[in-house]
Image: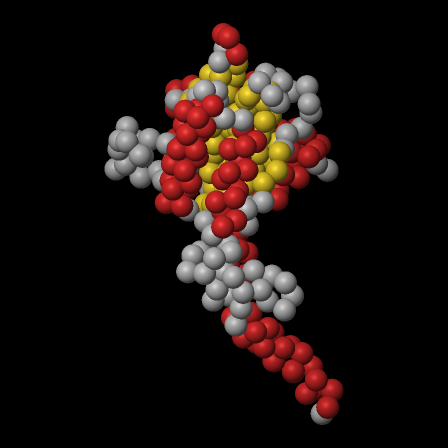
Amino acid sequence: KAYVLVCFIETFIFPFLDIIMSRRYDSRTTIFSPEGRLFQVEYAVEAISNAGATIGILTKEGIALIAEKRILSKLLDTKAVGVRREKIHKLDDHISCSVAGLTSDANILINKCRLSAQQYLFSYQEPMPVEQLARNLSDVKQGYTQFGGQRPFGVSMLIAGWDEHYGWQLYMTNPSGNYGGWQAMAIGSGNQVANNMLKTDYKEDLTLTEAIAMAARILQKSIDQPLTPEKVELATLTLGDNNKVVFKIFEEEEIKPIMDKLKKDTEEEAAAGGEGAP
């Protein structure tokens, strides 16, 4: 009987107590749990994990950004201001970003980044360094985890850009206020699968065209759904004349050949796998 009672307590009572104890520490962003965790920040990260995926890949020729669109209603006016771009946005002439998480939170942070970049340009008469913009954004995010009456921003961002100090750069910021530089990174749903594939497939000598194809292939496998042009946002950053950054958003008719090739390669891969099976 004693053994049965112990098993019952371990199986049913302890997990219930864990839930109750965690609820004591998740009502405020400023309260640490006994294990040193900030539950509200973890919940914000969880919200991002359920958002549309986005991938950034850095090459010597530029940076490729690709994202999964979630708003696909036929009634949506895609040419309306504020609706045309759901995931990828321009922050300054030399910096762009792709977001995963709550769109409303992302809009606030995008405006803060744009304002910060223009204030820097006005003050110093030169473009803002990419890393400094990422750091400023992360400082804002960190502040919302430290003061009462506020909640963390439920959004992660990939910040891509070029400056004369360090060339092409790709940064990722998360709700805790941490940021770091990456050669390739995926955020949003399926990010673990995508990042594992990036670790395996990424090479420093990738061309921009190869990076676009690889990003599309990994995005499709990470969300486990066929990609179509209307489900994808795609953008590249390259250098033009006089080291001027060219930010290009691909339209659906430009994305279609990339998706057609991806579909063909996927079918050939499936066929080859089927022939090799016993």
Q: Front-most of 270 and 25?
A: 25
* Residue in the picture at 47% in, 41% down: 100
Q: Is residue 238 visible?
A: yes
List x then y, in percent, for residue 272: 66, 28
Farthest residue toward the top?
A: 241
Farthest residue toward the bottom?
A: 1
Q: Front-most of 88 and 273?
A: 88
Query: Does residue 162 lie above or below 86 as drawn?
Result: above
* Residue in the picture at 65% in, 83% down: 8
In the rendered view of the protein, which quadrant contains the N terminus? bottom right
List x then y, in percent, for residue 77: 26, 33
Query: Does residue 141 lie above or below 212 as drawn?
Result: below
- What is the number of callouts on the image? 0
Looking at the image, residue 14 sits to the left or right of residue 174; the answer is right
List x then y, in percent, for residue 92: 43, 25
* Residue in the picture at 59% in, 27% down: 169
Query: Does residue 228 lie above or below 154 as drawn?
Result: above
In the rendered view of the protein, which quadrant contains the C terminus? top right
Looking at the image, residue 195 sits to the left or right of residue 246; the answer is right
* Colouring convention used in this rendered image of the protein: secondary structure
Q: Is residue 216 visible?
A: no
* Residue in the picture at 63% in, 33% down: 182
List x then y, in percent, for residue 195: 63, 38
Q: Front-most of 224 and 17?
A: 17
Query: Does residue 19 lie above or below 149 as drawn?
Result: below
